[in-house]
Image: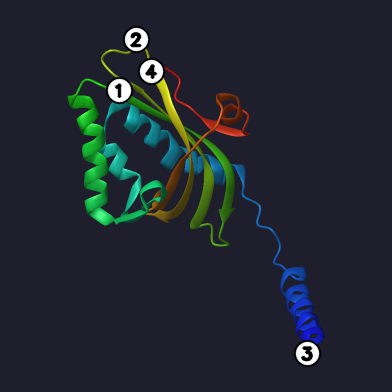
Amino acid sequence: MKHLLISTAVLFFGITFGQQRPQIQVSDEIIASIEKDVWIPFMEAYDESDSKKLKSIHSKNIIRVTLDQNQIEMGESYLEDFGNFVENVKEQGNKIGIAFAILTTALDESEQLAYQTGYYRFISQRPEDKDLVIRGYGKFHVGLKKEGGQWKIWLDSDRRIKLSHEDFKAQKIVYELRN
């Protein structure tokens, strides 16, 4: 009987994994449009402490998973809280920034859904700081979808990680604002 189960498992996995669908190639145009619609406005929103811009890159039905707190937030209430965070930074006289390094991009055949993984670098400047200071790194996973012709974040999940500046900068795709 054991032998039969092993043979069945080998047959199942051999058929399932041996006949995978072809890999979808993600064009440079798709990567550039996601950068333009999502990552550049995201970095600008942090740099300018602009809650309206920050909310504009997210779907109204956003699902936010904060893995370090085992927490899921959704929709308008999450967007309001996130917007209030950047507004409070401005009101307190602080400055924040974020940069992204993209590790992977997956795309559906209709090119209306994408999934990206990567690293982010969070920086801030408090009144006592002379310059912006790196406060930490994280790894993110986002689901993106086209809404009205623009990419929007509909799923956002992240976790803080230990990462060196060199490892962050070594990625093929790194998005940073130039000041």
The mark closer to the camera, 1 or 2, is 2
Task: Report the Cα–Cα distance between label 4 and label 2.
Answer: 7 Å
The answer to whether residue 88 of the structure is visible from this angle is yes
139 to the left or right of 70: right
Instruction: Give amino acid for label 2.
Output: Lys
In the orientation shown, which residue stands out farthest toward the bottom?
Answer: 1
Q: Secondary structure at mark 4?
A: loop
Residue behind mark 3: 1
How many callouts does the rendering have?
4
Q: Is residue 150 visible?
A: no
| Label 2 sits on residue | 130
Mark earlier in primary sequence (1, 2): 1
Secondary structure of the residue carrying tag 2 is: loop
| Sequence-earlier tag: 1 or 3 | 3
Badge 2: residue crowd in 10 Å (few <14, some 14–19, many ≥20):
few
- Say whether residue 150 is left or right of residue 172: left
Tag 1: amino acid: Lys
Q: CA distance from mark 3 to mark 4?
A: 65 Å
* Residue 78 against residue 179 in the figure, above or below: below
Q: CA distance from mark 4 to mark 1?
A: 8 Å
